[in-house]
Amino acid sequence: MSNSLLSVKSLKKSFGGLDAVNVKNFELFENQITSLIGPNGAGKTTFFDLITRFQNSDEGSIFFNSVDVSKISTYKLARLGMVRTFQLTRVFDRMSVFENMQFAGSSTSNEGLINSLIQNKSLKDEENKLSEKIDNILEKVNLIEMKNAYARELSGGQKKLLELGRSLMKDPKLLLLDEPLAGVNPKLADQILEIILDLTNQDVNILMVEHNIDAVMKISERVVVMAEGQIISDGKPDYVRTDKKVIEAYLGISDE
């Protein structure tokens, strides 16, 4: 069994007296692509928000790499290696693609600059190192030819790629992807899936929320299904696909 990377216990979040999330136990293991699916309103994005500390939970604990991160800031969590993207992309339209990447890597860059000063290294060398890293990631996400274009000139799908590239500037150990294929044409969707698969070969672990079930079943080693804020099924794609609880949740039918 792979090592546990993320452990969630008794996590709850309520709005107006209704449980949006009520997850008793969830563990994420290394070297896996795990997808989180469920019908609209199942609590998937809220669960993502709680894990990544964009919302505060009412109860429960979150451990990442054996560190209790239940109360820390999103910034500190990213520094520890947990990074996320959003369903609605968050890029800076008035900046170039390169500048967007540069901004995303600013904290890492600043640390590098400080280390350079301490070690009497050239600041120019550190800047070149950052520029090389940006180019490598832009190559990886197929945006190198758009490097100097303004982000506003990108298509919706290309902005998804840019946000993915920005997240990789943080050197994530765990990358949470919120609807990475939403609004993307089939050709670009295939490119994104290839990039995700390639990331797992570089020790980046993936937790993904996605409505494209065919894509989920194609690349996931594990599928977790939520409904009404709770996990109702968890297993390999073939198991989940035929689970009666999952069919009932999606179709609203029951044998009873």
Image (tube, rainbow, N blue to C red):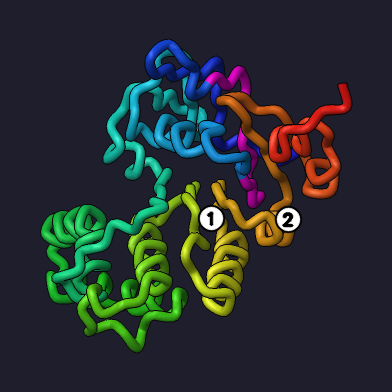
Q: What's the residue type where badge 1 is placed? A: Val
Residue on which disc 1 sits: 204
Dividing the picture into quadrants, the one containing residue 247 is top right
Dividing the picture into quadrants, the one containing residue 160 is bottom left
Separation of marks 1 and 2 at Cα, in angstroms:
19 Å
Q: Position of residue 37 (x, y in %)?
A: 62, 43
Quick one: 7 or 183, which is closer to the camera? Answer: 183
Observer-side mark, 1 or 2, equals 2
Quick one: 65 or 74, which is closer to the camera? Answer: 74
Residue stretch rendered in magenta on the structure: 22-35
As for residue 79 lying within the magenta part, the answer is no
As for residue 23 lying within the magenta part, the answer is yes
Is 194 drawn above or below residue 75 in the view shown? below
Element at badge 2? helix
Q: What's the residue type where badge 2 is placed? A: Met
**Which residue is rendered at x = 48% and y = 32% of the image?**
47
Judged by its main secondary structure, the magenta piece is strand
Apparent side of residue 79 relative to residue 120 in the rendered image (left or right): right
Is 21 drawn above or below residue 110 in the view shown? above
Quadrant in the picture for the N terminus: top right
Quick one: 70 or 93, which is closer to the camera? Answer: 93
User: In the rendering, which numbered label is found on residue 217?
Assistant: 2
Decide which of tag 1 and tag 2 comes sooner along the chain: 1
The crowd level at tag 1 (other Cα within 10 Å; few <14, some 14-19, many 20+) is many
Q: Position of residue 134 (x, y in %)?
A: 31, 73
Apparent side of residue 224 relative to residue 56 in the rendered image (left or right): right
Query: Which residue is situated farthest in the bottom direction here?
Result: 145
**Which residue is rendered at x = 44% and y = 33% of the image?**
46
